Image (cartoon, rainbow, N blue to C red):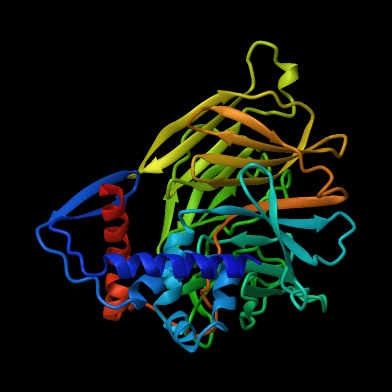
Amino acid sequence: MHIWFSITYLLHNLVYYRRTKTRRLNTAVVMSEIGNKFARLRSDYVPPIGHIEEVIINILSRLPVKTVVACKCVAKHWLKLISEPQFPHLQLNWSKKKPKYIICPYPEDYDTINHLCLLEGNGKIIEDVPLFGFDEVCSPEMTCFLNGLISSVNEDSDGLNDVDINIFNPITRDSIVLPRGSPSVVIPSVGVGFDPKSNDFKAFRFFSDSSKGEDVKYKCEVYTSGSTAWRRISEDVQRPQSSPINPLCPYYASIAGTVYWFVWSQDQPGTPVRILSVDMNDSFTKICLPTPLNVWSFLTEIEGCLSVVHFNNPGTYALNQNQDPYLEVYKLENSRWHLRSKSTIDLINVHSINSVAARDTEIFFIIKHDDESICYLIFDFVEESFTTLDLDEQFEGDCPVAFPFVESLLKCKLGETVSGLQLRCSSSFKFATLAWNNLLVEGEME
């Protein structure tokens, strides 16, 4: 039914557009967001709003992806506009302003994952996303990217020391499987990074071909979208690997095309000693920790920056009555660590933490207790407040894992490159946002 509501909304705005079409604004006010700051830009002249399709494009790009797909059947002209290569990027820009959570309810009995759940920050499940035909691409080793795509790494079912690497869009059901890499004597680790300005990606595969009796050394090879084979870039590197304490939590963070991961202590498995990263230029970098960490430390993205979320031993703090348990959030900005937030937290008998998913000004924790019960906790790191979500019934018998998520129309086909499309947009797309913003500004003035 919401498709017809959206169409009615579109037609209503087109009528408004016709009434205001002949007007010119003497001054245009365009708000451009840079980080958390806004720059107000003024000009004395604005180009004519142009054709009515500019408004159609702008309205369509703000609709949910499934509604946009349905709109392809409304009119051939709409189909043409939505099929333009620039449209998915315009849609993604709006979608990023309304991020959600996507939850993978991984079954405790290791059965097939048959659906994902879209979740609002208030705990309301707004949509179940069926995964019929995707049985082979979902695993607990998943990473969700803020372009609507998900990577899934599955161990080879034939008993070989290899993995299947899948990238898919759960909304449009587009998917690819990467080719196999070099032979390995251990199960490889994988990290995927997406260029934020395009749909280009790089998959980094960490493997070992050491002979028996030799110390295991890990090498890294990379697969680039548009290529046909893996390419080796490092002969000796410390690989990313899951935490022995929190095995369901993603073991790396992918931020603006760079993959980050903890290097664990050899004496205290699961305790970070440093951070490593590799970027789209295949460059490796060592990063110092913001503070001494423990096994309850996690990497995530906050406000577009690499961040560390750190608990001071929530599972054992009752043994230390001299200090209240607390949660710290550190953010790496301009190559320096800053304490973004710190708050006391009431957590006891923690077995593991399944998820640390951040969006906007909040972090979503999924925490498993020693008695097998699961706690769903939202932390607002600006207000330094906690909210518990009631999701026990929805995910009873599951081990859910959550990720921040935005809907998109982006495809993940091998070899598809869309770099620079924003710079080569047609005039309709080029002025669509400006035209719509001008209409909104004019409406506010009236």
Taking the view exactly as shown, the residue that stands out farthest to the top is 322
Q: Tell me what residue is drawn at x 90 percent, y 58 percent.
A: 109
Q: Is residue 394 visible?
A: yes
332 to the left or right of 152: left
Name the residue nearer the viewer: 176 or 183.
176
State the image coordinates of residue 26 (x, y, percent, origin top left). 12, 58
Work out whether residue 157 or residue 109 is closer to the camera in this orientation and state it: 109
In this view, the residue farthest toward the right is 109
**Residue at left 36%, top 64%?**
16
- In the picture provided, is 89 more to the left or to the right than 268? left
Q: Quadrant of residue 174?
A: bottom right
Camera-nearest residue between 55 and 201: 55
Q: Is residue 251 visible?
A: no
Counting labels gives 0
| Residue 309 x/y as whole percent | 56, 38
The quarter of the displayed image where residue 199 is located: bottom left
Residue 99: x percent and y percent?
53, 53
On screen, 111 above or below 166?
A: above
Tell me which residue sits at (44%, 86%) in the image. 77
Give the residue drawn at x 46%, y 73%. 88
Quarter where residue 273 is shown:
top right
Quarter of the image with the N terminus in it:
bottom right
Tell me residue 87's x, y (percent).
42, 75
Q: Residue furthest left?
A: 44
